[in-house]
Image: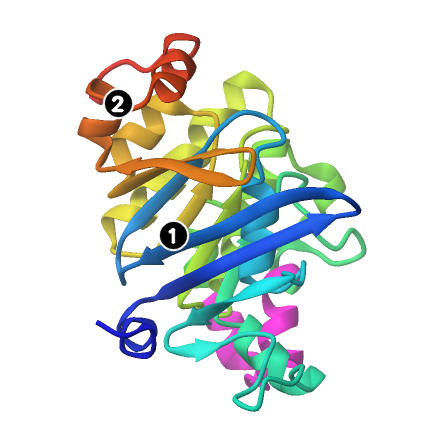
Amino acid sequence: MSDANTSETAAVSIRHLSKSFDDVEVLRDVELEVKTGDVVTIIGSSGSGKSTLLRCINWLEQPDRGSIHIAGQRIGVNDAGRPMPVRELAKVRAKTGMVFQGFNLWPHLNVLHNVTEAPIHVQGTPRREAEERAMALLEKVGMAHKRDSYPNTLSGGQKQRVAIARALAMQPTVMLFDEPTSALDPELVGEVLAVIKDLSAEGYTMIMVTHEMAFARAVSDQVVFLEKGLIIERADPETFFTAPRTDRVRRFLENHDTPSPA
């Protein structure tokens, strides 16, 4: 199958992606395809390029080489190979919903307005429609009762659930999760993972960077291992966690608690 056809049929298609910072090559010729409705988990040691890969997908970082297609449309570069105009880039970027480690909620807006701001001002959604969608999403993540609260009054787990609702409000093609539980106290991790698990059961397309190995095993369709910017192993979760092909992945898993999924 040609790259063009693959890009049209995949939610995300990445070809020959490379990225360097100064003299350090962080991503090296990465190729990845994510089917609609699949959950792909990216794992690896700190500094392996996981977060950079996510940030390239929605063009928060511009790769040096390679291409990224989202729902068949290339991001960052137009058909003539020139940088996309800002407005066109914003439209393609809106096909991705990003959930960051640090929540990134607007502190001066209450929960409801955090979720409605982008649909109203970026997509031009009428306020009433945006608020109805926001309340449905806040209900989904268990935060409807906090609609009038401000971020500084919320726990870390509550902030992250609002951040998930905010990303979903743009009705993205793919959700990107960059270590969504790493900034949380241990007792708050479960409430965020439960929301993500529900989204996977509903068929949302997701690419997730996480250190939660048991969770990755339970929800993923594909697990990808990055090492120094290279994909050195990828497999379905059962194969990945029970019969890794490389010594590097085997050593990594030995140092992480990966019990069987419930």
Q: Which comes sooner in the sequence, label 1 or label 2? A: 1
As shown in the figure, which amino acid type bears the numbered disc 2? Answer: Pro
* Camera-side residue of 249 and 12: 249
- Which residue is painted at 52% across and 25% down in the image? 188
Q: Position of residue 42 (x, y in %)?
A: 43, 39
Question: Which type of secondary structure does the marked residue at label 2 adopt?
Answer: loop
Instruction: State the quadrant of the C terminus.
Output: top left
* Camera-side residue of 55 and 49: 49
Q: Position of residue 113 (x, y in %)?
A: 66, 64
Q: What is the span of residues highlighted in magenta in the rendered image?
A: 114-134
Instruction: State the quadrant of the N terminus.
Output: bottom left
Residue 196 colored in magenta in the image: no
Mark 1 or 2: in front is 2
Mark 2 highlights which residue?
244
Mark 1 highlights which residue?
206
- Which residue is painted at 56% across and 71% down in the image? 93
In this rendering, the answer to whether 232 lies above or below 203 is: above
